[in-house]
Image (tube, rainbow, N blue to C red):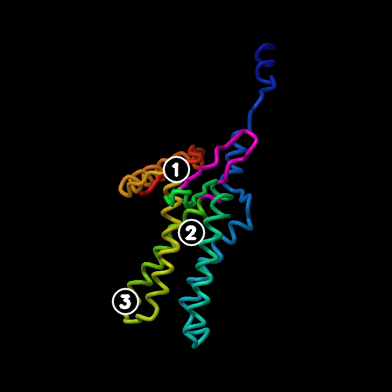
Amino acid sequence: MKQALVDDTEDVSLDFGNEEELAFRKAKIRHPVATFFHLFFRVSAIVTYVGCDWFSKSFVGCFVTVLLLLSFDFWSVKNVTGRLMVGLRWWNQIDEDGKSHWIFEARKVSPDMVAATEAEARVFWLGLIVCPMIWIVFFFSSLFSLKLKWLALVIAGISLQAANLYGYVLCKMGGESDVSKITASFLSQTVFQTACPSDFQKPGLEGLEIHKH
């Protein structure tokens, strides 16, 4: 009876480290400024485009404003928010022979470096995927409503945001250049990440180069 009492009251060491880390990665946003600007420019461009007829009668003013917002969005997403929020980066460089090289990098997570949180990663990918789809809707609406003067702006929006989406998908999938393989792999990995949230952000690629002749 005494032995049972000792067993029942014996201190048990519980490790809450993994649960705390998982909760941190799910809920915490480590880069609030980057997360804000990841959505600010692209959402502002969409809102300005939709409300141009209400805010101003100047087509040129609206055109330039939206184009500037799209350009700011392209630069910030390509050079800042992707690196901070998901640890990915891509760019193009020309070597001395005039050949174009596409470089895709993914940050390796070290024990001293906390991985990007799931909240940030979800915001990043949702903003990256949804906004180009909205511009595609704008393209067909402008085409069918015969607002042809807006087509150049809409095409610019699709091109700039699709370029970032394409580059980051290549980073995520290891620099694979086959579009069909990219799509299949990205969808399967997304399903897997949804089932296993703890493995959401584990990029394993660093410094991969793709040469295009």
Q: Which mark is residue 126?
A: none
- Front disc: 1 or 3: 1
User: Could you tell me which secondary element the residue under label 3 belongs to?
Assistant: helix
Q: Are marks 2 and 1 in contact (CB under 8 Å)?
A: no
Tell me which amino acid carries mark 3: Leu
Name the residue furthest front: 97
Q: Which mark is residue 127?
A: 2
Mark closest to the chain's N terminus, 3 or 2: 2
Q: Which residue sits at x=61%, y=38%?
A: 21
Q: Which mark is residue 209?
A: 1
Cα–Cα span, label 1 and label 3 = 38 Å
Residue 173 screen position, x and y as percent: 41, 43
Cα–Cα span, label 3 and label 2 = 25 Å
Look at the image and say whether residue 134 sits in the magenta stretch.
no
Q: Which residue sits at x=52%, y=84%?
A: 55
The residue beneath circle 3 is 143
Q: Does residue 148 appear to the left or right of 17 in the view shown?
A: left
Residue 92 screen position, x and y as percent: 47, 52
Tell me which amino acid carries mark 1: Glu
Q: Does residue 23 appear to the left or right of 200 in the view shown?
A: right
User: Could you tell me which secondary element the residue under label 1 belongs to?
Assistant: strand
Label 3: few (<14), some (14–19) or many (≥20) C-alpha neighbours in 10 Å: some
Q: Is 71 in front, or is 30?
A: 71
Point out the stretch of residues depicted in magenta: 103-121
Residue 148 screen position, x and y as percent: 35, 80
Q: Is 90 in front, or is 190?
A: 90
